[in-house]
Image (spheres, grey):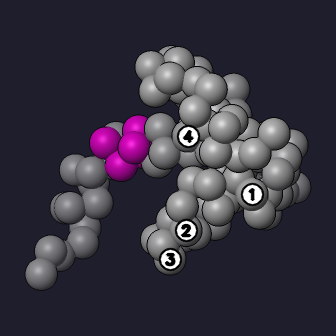
């Protein structure tokens, strides 16, 4: 099955509901990448995956290059990052000048 068809199989609504509980897919373990948040069962950190998108990778490219990664796991990375930002936004802006 091609990655594009995997993505199309699930509606956006289903994907969002599955990833709204990012704790099912993301965890921290001091023995894995010094405790960075990673996709469970992998050494793929949230930071690394977000970096791929920052470099211009598409969802399809990530899934094709990391075939054990599921669409739900990948989308949970964004939910996790979004929650981290929303919870830490005030502290971040208080300590980091915006230019």
Q: Are marks 2 and 3 in contact (CB under 8 Å)?
A: yes
Q: Tell me which residue sits at (75%, 45%) in the image.
A: 2
Q: Which of disc 4 and disc 3 is earlier in sequence?
A: 3
Q: Quadrant of the C terminus?
A: bottom left
- The structure residue drawn at horizontal position 74% and vertical position 57%, both measured from the top left corner, is 64
In this figure, which residue is indicated by the disc labeled 4?
75
Q: What residue would you read off at disc 3?
A: 55
Residues rendered magenta in the picture: 82-86
SS for callout 3: loop
**Local SS, label 1:** helix
Residue nearer the viewer, 48 or 17? 17
Measure the alpha-carbon separation of dots 3 and 4.
Answer: 17 Å
Q: Which comes before the other along the chain, label 4 or label 1?
A: 1
Q: According to the image, label 1 marks what residue?
A: 64
Q: Nearer the viewer, mark 4 or mark 1?
A: 1
Report x, y in % for residue 89.
Answer: 27, 51
Q: Estimate the spatial distance between the alpha carbons at disc 2 and disc 4, rounded to whole Å.
A: 14 Å
Q: CA distance from mark 4 to mark 1?
A: 15 Å
Where is residue 44? Give x, y as percent. 75, 58
């Amino acid at each position: 099955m091609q990655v594009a068809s995997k993505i199309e199989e699930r509606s956006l609504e289903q994907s969002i509901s599955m990833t709204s509980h990012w704790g099912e897919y993301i965890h921290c373990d001091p023995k894995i990448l010094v405790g960075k948040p990673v996709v469970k069962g992998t050494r793929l950190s949230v930071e690394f995956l977000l970096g791929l998108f920052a470099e211009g990778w598409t969802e399809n490219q990530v899934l094709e290059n990391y075939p054990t990664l599921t669409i739900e796991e990948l989308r949970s990375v964004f939910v996790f990052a979004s929650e981290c930002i929303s919870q830490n936004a005030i502290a971040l802006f208080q300590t980091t000048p915006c230019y």
